[in-house]
Amino acid sequence: MNNTRPAGLQPGESASRSPQDGMPKPSDCLEIVQECLNQFKVTRTQLQQIQANLLCSMEQALKRQDSSANSVRMSPTYIGSMPNGTEQGDFLVLELGTKGASLRVLWVTLTDTKEQCVKPKSQEFVIPQEVMLGTGKQLFDFAAHCLSEFLDAHTLKNQYLKLGFNFPFPCHQTGLDRSTLISWTKGFRCSGVEGQDVVQLLREAIQRQKAHCIDVVAMVNDTVGLMMDCKCDSKFCDVGLIVDTGTNACYMEEARHVKALDMDHGCTCISIEWGSFCDEAALRPVLTTFDHALDCESLDPGAQRFEKMIGGLYLGELVRLVLVHFAQHGILFGGCTSPALLSQGSILLEHVIKMEDPATGKAEILTVLQDLGLSPRVSDIEHVQHVCAAVCTRAAQLCAAALAAVLSHLQRSREQQTLHAAVATGGRMLEKHPRFHQTLKEMVMLLVPECDVSFIPSVDDGGWGVAMVTAVAARLATHKRILEDTLAPFQLSFEQLKMVQAQMRTAMIKGLQGEASSLRMLPTYVRATPDGSERGDFLALDLGGTNFRVLLVRVVEGSVQITNQVYSIPEHIAQGSGEQLFDHIVDCIVDFQQSQGLSGHNLPLGFTFSFPCKQLGLDQAILLNWTKGFSASGCEGQDVVNLLREAIKRKQGVELDVVAIVNDTVGTMMSCGYDDPRCEIGLIVGTGTNACYMEELQNVASVEGNSGRMCINMEWGAFGDDGTLGMFLTRFDDCVDQASINPCKQRFEKMISGMYLGEIVRHILLHLTSLGALFRGQMTQGLQTRDIFKTKFLSEIESDSLALRQVRAILENLGLPLTSDDALMVLEVCQAVSRRAAQLCGAGMAAVVEKMRENRGLQELTVSVGVDGTLYKLHPHFSKLVSATVQKLAPHCKVTFLQSEDGSGKGAALVTAVACRLAQRVSV
């Protein structure tokens, strides 16, 4: 540590004396005082070093990389929410030691009015010195007695009282109502408390009183209470700062940055406990011998070094030590001291604040010095004022450096070029000292010029804020129960998923046998997957929406090369006649052939047609019904391949060989099957959902033959249309179904696919809002707008890489102004809905692979699934949940999921290529 002596006077030296009185000359005294006080001057470079080192210590502590006793603690307070203005009720607050040797009890009533808080009832109690230095039991019994006395005096006889406990000492919190005292500060030394849960000690003391039923809901330090106390433009502050007996700060941090919490989402308030900061490199240059003397005489030598340069408990003592030094060297008071001046603690924070007052300070100094038994001269009074100013200015500048570190961290973690932050301030130094606040503000502006900082003074030193924390905790507990009850039907147990698997299996068997079933189990007449020997050029037509593609697919050894062109189908054609629609399609094919130099070439064509069809052959498919906005007349009930061929005939000079019609699910299976011969299943989870797989031909009643296999288009989106899924449907599923264009149909698809998940989420959010658990109970126009909540928002909101503020931005763009609590609740809703969708999809797939395994009489089946669809591909967790569910429900099947690349186009060409290969084999 620094062992320098005060500049200007060394031990054993005395100042030059005037011949008249034997004392230093007045001019010499002023120079010596100024030179000595230069020790308390801190340069901007030194402050920037403290800022940088403290910031580093903070971030290391968040990551739990620094366990040094002298490091910043960064303690989570488990306060995960700011008030949202709806908090109501009566709350009890107990403040212990916030202003030194005192205890305060408050009764706070929160209302739903604009002011929100009725003036609280309060009573202050002085803590006897013997209690402060006695046992923990004495202290907490004293606190419980004060609570009881307060409640009796105010005739508050409520049966159930929620209490917030303000305990401003370094603690390790493991929950909102669980907090272990690390060490006493501020003159308290009660035995048997350090290392103990102070909330539990208070509860036990309250129980010993047996007078009132009090539930200690939250443990809050004074800094956190302060932050929750203050608003800036109707918004609560980002940071809390206290400089009173001690000093500390807190701020709201994203939970994902706090390693101790092991949480991906949400926020938590962090108590910095910066009083313990003692970085040698940063603090050594600014420590004086007076700081070392104060530390040695303190109750905790070597600890809380930063606080001992800033906190009010110590500033008066620093001033006293300097005055003693000057008096002993003949600079002040005629070289005289007094027993009072030599007594530790004789100059208090209140004295320092009053002595620096520009208007009355000199008179106050005279009073204080005379009370200390001194006889000051006029020049002494001026010197004392200089001493107070030097000590307090340094304190304000050091505090500014620490606050600048916090603001720098917030700016960095929030990735904001300019941080707009509101700092709640409290404590006597900030509230009553004439220059401390201004010095702090000016230095913060110098140290973090890129931050726009507002300083908001506390109205009640945090007492109301502690009540607010308690109220917020009560609100969150209520809202959590509402959310859990709402989402409970979406939490599917293993037994329920096994039931879905069994029902799917039963429906598959019935559908294959031609019995009544919600699964159509349509033969596709695709009898084989690619074996790698396919070669040639093929055309593919991919029609599944208002945009369609024409593709040239070249299958060569080891690769598939694709060239494609996108064409649009105008609405008047999609909803016109079938002849118009297919003529337009043929025109586009001809245009593509011309652009590729293929005019006159008769290439085999595969037709991906992603609408419900009943196939009668590889090149025969009866359209059952239009979907996706199409309603072209004269098509339903007709063979769409024949409609295409007739359009080709109407186009003079065009020859096309339509070999196969394929739906997108089969195309996906074939596309992945080219790369992996084990791929015998296709799965689509996008706007809609469907699956196909290779079934033993002997099990397909509608197709002749007992040998070989055939791909079956399950059309599993309709699973459950017969009511088998009734017990799994929620009120929200029913709302979405009734508002759809096909009520009571495609029930499985409406629980899984991208077209519907966003709407399910929206209806849940409407319900939670109606119960007051979301958006402050305020219905917005956006929330009531159908289909405003797209399924892509689920993927974005559930992304692990997004911070909660980015989730808020997504929702606010939808016209949903919300708090971090709302964002977290929306996240949980999205997770529940998408998790259920993935698990249902996995249960269906488990039924498929188990049936294939049993069909083949295998102990273990190894199979691959080709998958396509935006929901499956873009959602951050969907694919893993599907795979995990299949593994759990079908443990004897080793299933690999392969994401398809252009399954609908490439797959159609490969179906055509396989058909050509098989045809050549037959002809040979």
Image (tube, rainbow, N blue to C red):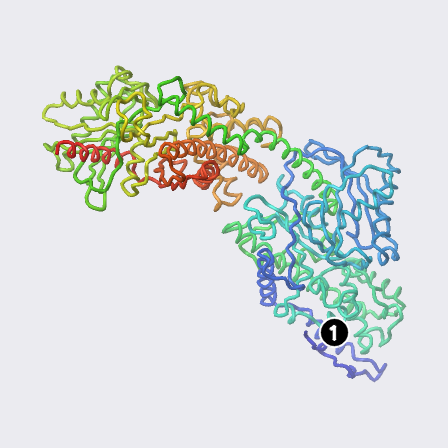
Answer with left or right where residue 351 lies relative to residue 599.
right
Q: Nearer the viewer, residue 497 or 737?
A: 497
x 34%, y 32%: residue: 693
**Secondary structure category for the residue under label 1:** helix
Dividing the picture into quarters, in which one does residue 855 lie? top left
Dividing the picture into quarters, in which one does residue 277 lie? bottom right
x 12%, y 37%: residue: 597
Q: Which residue is identified by label 1?
A: 33
Dividing the picture into quarters, in which one does residue 318 lie? bottom right
Q: Residues within 10 Å of mark 1 (few under 14, many from 20)?
A: many
> Looking at the picture, does residue 146 appear above or below residue 403?
above
> Looking at the picture, does residue 758 appear above or below residue 673?
above
Residue 357 seen in the current view:
no
Percent across and percent down for residue 559 are 23, 45
Q: What is the quadrant of the C terminus in the image?
A: top left
Q: Nearer the viewer, residue 353 or 5?
A: 5
Residue 306 seen in the current view:
yes
Answer with left or right where residue 160 lies relative to residue 615.
right
Q: What is the quadrant of the N terminus in the image?
A: bottom right
Q: Nearer the viewer, residue 833 or 572?
A: 833
Percent across and percent down for residue 37 are 71, 71
x 39%, y 31%: residue: 851
**Count of residue discs:** 1
Percent across and percent down for residue 167 are 75, 50
Percent across and percent down for residue 876 are 45, 41
Q: Amino acid at mark 1?
A: Val
